[in-house]
Image (cartoon, coloured by chain):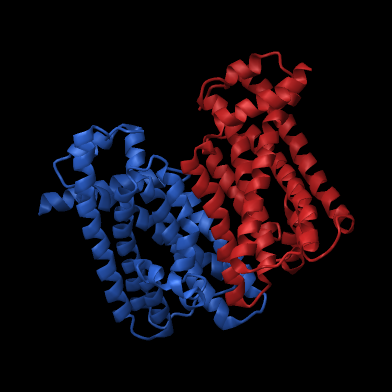
Chain colours: A red, B blue
């Protein structure tokens, strides 16, 4: 029961306290304007190059932008404790680490999902893309999987934020790598083979492929393999994040580096 | 005159050093547009059209200049405020313009680094050597882009000083700038109602001048328009800066966070 309380209540409180993009003055430019503009930018690049359809870029870039809250919010919910000098209090509490950190991930998954859907909805409306009504429920599910796996990467990044000072730089670098390697604007099959292979081990790749399939009329069952792979990749990063958190926590106690900024 | 030049040089040098030691304002400001340029070039490369690759390659090289200015300039005064140095900037015995323009010029210098890195990246990674007919005009166009962007950055920095989260506004300007300035997409391809917005940004004209220089035609007209628009933003910023400072002093809101 305590673990459940930590997971849901603690996670939500940490998210609200640490993730200062909840202010509408930051949220609207960052979470509404920017994803729409990224979708439009690449849709027009696609039109100019005569490559792909608007739907291709809407799906790819909207899902790619889910990475921004997933990476930065997870980083902020851990690094924010250090900046606020409350990390020591958190780590000396008797709370189990699994619900403590995974609880922080749940609101982030919802946030990432919302941002991606803003991009998809606005992109379809502004560019006149038609996605069949029957595809939307499947699309909602696929975006949840994308957001969850990306949050796994965010957790691993958050763990590194215990050691790396420039977590904002790290988040931007990861976001850019996802943009280039995950088949956001060029299908993985059209990327150089080594890039396509790397992309297969990153979050978003399989979800973007699945979302494009669903938007084109495939059922969820048809893309279930891709969804399983997406969730599997996310689970790997989540596990890596939890292991890194445990390792850095132990080491920071041993070396007295917890509050080092 | 000598004192004024020395003050401008000191301000520029200090700001350039500060930017160069920041991972966010230095290396990331180069890496971020470089990755977007890579994504765009990967799209253009699919058809293997040489002319289209040259078009995208030129734009991709210059687009980083916009990134280096937009995000940092928008939060320039806010950063001074957070650092507790805004009051010192305001009470300095020189005009705000003479403090801010060297700062935005330092950002434009990071933008020039970005152009060099992207040109080398295109050559080594995409095997895309840029074909430029007139290198002198090409360099002049780039310098004009940098100069007018620093004036535009000055305008941005004073315009958003009352907006507490100005960095997020600056970040949100990144993609629209890339789209409107014609770096990767011809302005003609955008909806008609967006054209006046494109023409109102000096970088659109600088980018057109870069393309003229690369094609071997005269970029003088584009450079002239670019300069006029850049100076207009500087004049507007100087007037706005005075008004905002007077207001901040009158209402005691300079240190507002």
* Total number of numbered discs in the rendering: 0
Q: Residue at x 36, y 53 (%)?
A: B107
Counting from the top left corner in percent of width and height, residue B102 is at: 26, 52
Counting from the top left corner in percent of width and height, residue A88 is at: 59, 17
Q: Residue at x 67, y 68 (%)?
A: A129
Q: Residue furthest right?
A: A221
- Left or right? Give the position of B71 relative to B253: right
What is the quadrant of residue A209 in the picture?
Answer: bottom right
Between B18 and B62, the one lying in front of the other is B62
Can residue B8 be seen in this snapshot? yes
Q: Residue at x 44, y 72 (%)?
A: B193
Q: Quadrant of the C terminus of chain B?
A: top left
Say above or below: A151 vs B155: above
Q: Residue at x 87, y 53 (%)?
A: A224
Can residue A166 be seen in this snapshot? no
Q: Residue furthest front?
A: A133
Counting from the top left corner in percent of width and height, residue B111 is at: 41, 59
Q: Quadrant of the N terminus of chain B?
A: bottom left
- Left or right? Give the position of B220 relative to A77: left
Counting from the top left corner in percent of width and height, residue A91 is at: 65, 18
Q: Residue furthest bottom?
A: B217
- Left or right? Give the position of A192 relative to B50: right
- Left or right? Give the position of A69 relative to A192: left
Between A113 and B211, the one lying in front of the other is A113
What is the quadrant of residue A63 in the picture?
Answer: bottom right
């Amino acid at each position: 029961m305590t673990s459940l309380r930590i997971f849901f209540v603690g996670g939500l409180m940490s998210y609200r306290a640490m993730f200062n993009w909840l202010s509408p003055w930051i949220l609207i430019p960052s979470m509404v304007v920017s994803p729409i503009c990224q979708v439009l930018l690449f849709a027009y690049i696609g039109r100019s190059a005569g490559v792909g359809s608007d739907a291709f870029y809407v799906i790819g870039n909207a899902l790619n932008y889910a990475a921004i809250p997933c990476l930065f919010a997870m980083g902020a919910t851990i690094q924010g404790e250090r900046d606020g000098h409350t990390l020591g209090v958190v780590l000396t509490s008797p709370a189990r680490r699994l619900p403590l950190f995974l609880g922080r991930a749940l609101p982030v998954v919802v946030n990432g999902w919302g941002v991606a859907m803003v991009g998809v909805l606005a992109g379809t409306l502004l560019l006149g893309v038609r996605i069949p009504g029957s595809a939307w429920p499947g699309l909602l599910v696929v975006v949840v999987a994308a957001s969850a796996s990306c949050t796994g990467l965010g957790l691993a990044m958050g763990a590194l934020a215990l050691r790396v000072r420039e977590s904002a730089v790290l988040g931007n670098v990861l976001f850019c790598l996802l943009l280039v390697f995950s088949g956001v604007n060029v299908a993985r099959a059209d990327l150089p083979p080594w890039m396509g292979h790397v992309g297969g081990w990153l979050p978003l790749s399989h979800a973007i492929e699945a979302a494009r399939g669903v938007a084109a009329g495939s059922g969820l069952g048809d893309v279930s393999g891709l969804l399983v792979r997406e969730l599997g990749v996310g689970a790997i990063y989540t596990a890596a994040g939890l292991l890194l958190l445990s390792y850095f926590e132990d080491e920071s106690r041993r070396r007295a580096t917890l509050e080092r900024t | 005159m000598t004192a004024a030049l020395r003050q401008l040089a000191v301000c520029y040098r200090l700001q350039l050093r500060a930017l160069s030691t920041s991972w966010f304002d230095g290396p990331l400001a180069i890496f971020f547009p470089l990755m977007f340029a890579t994504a765009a070039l990967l799209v253009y490369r699919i058809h293997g059209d040489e002319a289209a690759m040259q078009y995208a390659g030129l734009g991709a090289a210059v687009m980083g200049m916009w990134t280096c200015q937009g995000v940092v300039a928008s939060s320039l005064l806010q950063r001074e405020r957070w650092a507790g140095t805004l009051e010192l900037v305001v009470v300095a015995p020189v005009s705000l313009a003479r403090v801010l323009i060297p700062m935005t010029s330092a950002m434009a210098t990071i933008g020039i680094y970005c152009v060099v890195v992207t040109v080398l990246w295109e050559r080594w990674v995409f095997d895309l050597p840029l074909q430029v007919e007139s290198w002198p005009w090409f360099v002049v166009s780039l310098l004009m882009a940098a100069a007018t962007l620093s004036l535009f950055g000055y305008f941005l920095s004073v315009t958003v000083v009352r907006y507490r989260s100005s960095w997020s506004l600056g970040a949100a300007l990144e993609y629209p700038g890339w789209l409107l300035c014609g770096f990767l997409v011809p302005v003609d391809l955008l909806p008609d109602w967006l054209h006046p917005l494109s023409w109102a940004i000096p970088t659109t004209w600088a980018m057109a001048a870069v393309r003229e220089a690369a094609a071997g035609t005269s970029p003088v007209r584009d450079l002239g328009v670019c300069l006029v628009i850049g100076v207009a933003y500087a004049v507007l910023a100087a007037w706005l800066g005075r008004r905002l400072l007077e207001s901040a002093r009158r209402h005691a809101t300079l240190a507002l966070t």
